[in-house]
Structure formats: C-alpha cells, structure tokens
Image: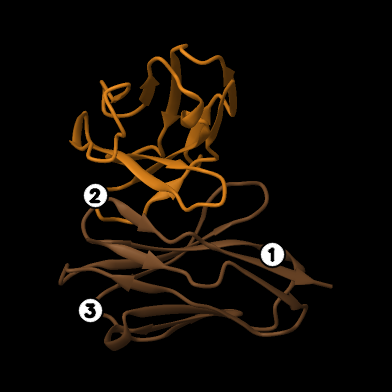
C-alpha cells in the first residue's frame, strides 16, 4: 500500500533561516510521481512541484529546492532564506496512477 | 485562466439531511477528483472521474456518498443522511488527464450539526 510520512508536525523558524521539510514515501509501484503542495491559511492547496520516479535530479526554483533520493525513498523540500509569507502547511504526496496519497503535512511558521 | 471553483464555500446542515457539493474544473481538464480533508490531516482520496465515468471510487466511505459528472465537466458530490463525522473540507481537483498534475479548488467546508 502507498504511504507518505511527514514526521515533522510543526516547525518554527526565524525569518531568513533555511528550513528543510522531510518526506518519506512507501510504494510498490515502479513508476510513480511525487508532489509538494502548499496550503496557506486561506486553505487552498497550491501546487509546487511534481517529480517522476525516473528523474532523481535535484531541482531548484528560486528559494525552493527539492532533494529526491530513491535509495532512501525520500523527497525533501528546502526553503532557503525563509520569509513570513512561507508560513503555511506543506504537504508531500505520492501518486502511482491517478489518485494521490498525502502525508499529514508539516506546519511551518516563519517568525519576523 | 480560471482555476477550479467549488460551491458553496461553506455548508452547514443538520444530521440526517442531504447535501450536494459542486465542482467546476479547469476548462479542458478531462480528469476530476474529490478528496476530503479533516482537521489536521492531509487530503484523503474519495473518487476520480475520467470524462463522465467514475474510474475509481474506492475512497468513498460508504453508500451514503455518491458523485456524478454527467457531461464530463461539472461534478456534484452528494451525501445522503449526513452524520456529524462527515464534517470536513471537501476538495475538488482537476488535471488534463489521469496521472497529470492535479490543481485544487478552494474547497467546501461542510459542518454537520
């Protein structure tokens, strides 16, 4: 069965600190996709990134970077120089075909 | 372009009543999904439509829950004989095709008193 674990329930940092959100997944699929979504206080899930299981290259987008390691079934997300606007709940998700399986989320609070 | 829209944004009902939640996907998206998010949890899959047909309804909790998408666009999630445990945010998402990136709507917060 598919499972996504986000062990960090809540993280609190001070603005400009770097922060890494952990995600570990379990799947028996040979081809799958991994996702990160952001859920700000407004409630709407915002898509951040999608990775194919065959593509283990790390990705950087501005202050955001993602580290995909198939050997440890992890897909971690790092925010560099965090800002107050980064405060949100972040969800990691995994999908083999259509439906997504989400972790329980990590609540990130960035304090000024 | 317009994103996924859901109506109503909030719905308060009494135990035992029937409710309908509506989802309007992004134009051109053939796949539509319903998820349910309880407080402090991640979204949980309910049902997936490809076109007009329900391709996977394995996440529907019981037969009080039903969803339709008669013309392959707008979808309605129907809950009969609501129970207090049905209280949650119901999220709709759409994608160009199954297994493509899913884009979510703002959700409908259902409260059953």
Q: Chain of mark 3?
A: A
- Residue at 27%, 88% in the rendered image: A71
**Residue A112 in picture, x, y percent from top left:** 84, 73
Same chain for the residues under marks 1 and 2 in the image = no
Please give the residue where the numbered disc 2 appears in the rendered image: B98
Identify the element where label 3 is drawn.
loop
Task: Report whether B77 appears left or right of A15.
Answer: left
Task: Report whether B71 appears left or right of A23.
Answer: left
Give the color scheme: rainbow, by chain, secondary structure or one colour. by chain
Q: Residues within 10 Å of mark 2 (few under 14, many from 20)?
A: many
**Residue A25 in picture, x, y percent from top left:** 33, 71
Q: Where is the C terminus of chain B found, in terms of image quarters?
A: top right
Task: Report whether A7 appears left or right of A43.
Answer: left
Image quadrant where residue B13 sits: top right
Identify the element where label 2 is drawn.
loop
Please give the residue where the numbered disc 1 appears in the rendered image: A87
Q: Residues within 10 Å of mark 1 (few under 14, many from 20)?
A: many
């Amino acid at each position: 069965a598919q499972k996504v674990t986000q062990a960090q329930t809540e993280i609190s940092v001070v603005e400009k600190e770097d922060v890494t959100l952990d995600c570990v997944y379990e799947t028996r699929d040979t081809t799958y996709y991994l996702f990160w979504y952001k859920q700000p206080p407004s409630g709407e899930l915002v898509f951040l990134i999608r990775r194919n299981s065959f593509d283990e290259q790390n990705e950087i987008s501005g202050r955001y970077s993602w580290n995909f390691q198939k050997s440890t079934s992890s897909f971690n997300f790092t925010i560099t120089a965090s800002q107050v606007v980064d405060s949100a709940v972040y969800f990691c998700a995994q999908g083999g075909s259509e439906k997504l399986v989400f972790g329980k989320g990590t609540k990130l609070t960035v304090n000024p | 372009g317009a994103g996924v829209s859901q109506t109503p944004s909030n719905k308060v009902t009494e135990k035992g009543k029937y409710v309908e939640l509506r989802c309007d996907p992004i134009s051109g998206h053939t796949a539509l999904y319903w998820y349910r998010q309880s407080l402090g949890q991640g979204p949980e899959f309910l049902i997936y439509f490809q076109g007009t047909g329900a391709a996977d309804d394995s996440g529907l909790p019981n037969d009080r829950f039903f969803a339709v998408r008669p013309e392959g666009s707008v979808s309605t999630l129907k809950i009969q004989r609501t129970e207090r445990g049905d209280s949650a945010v119901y999220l709709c998402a759409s994608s160009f095709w199954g297994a493509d990136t899913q884009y979510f709507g703002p959700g409908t917060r259902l409260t059953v008193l």
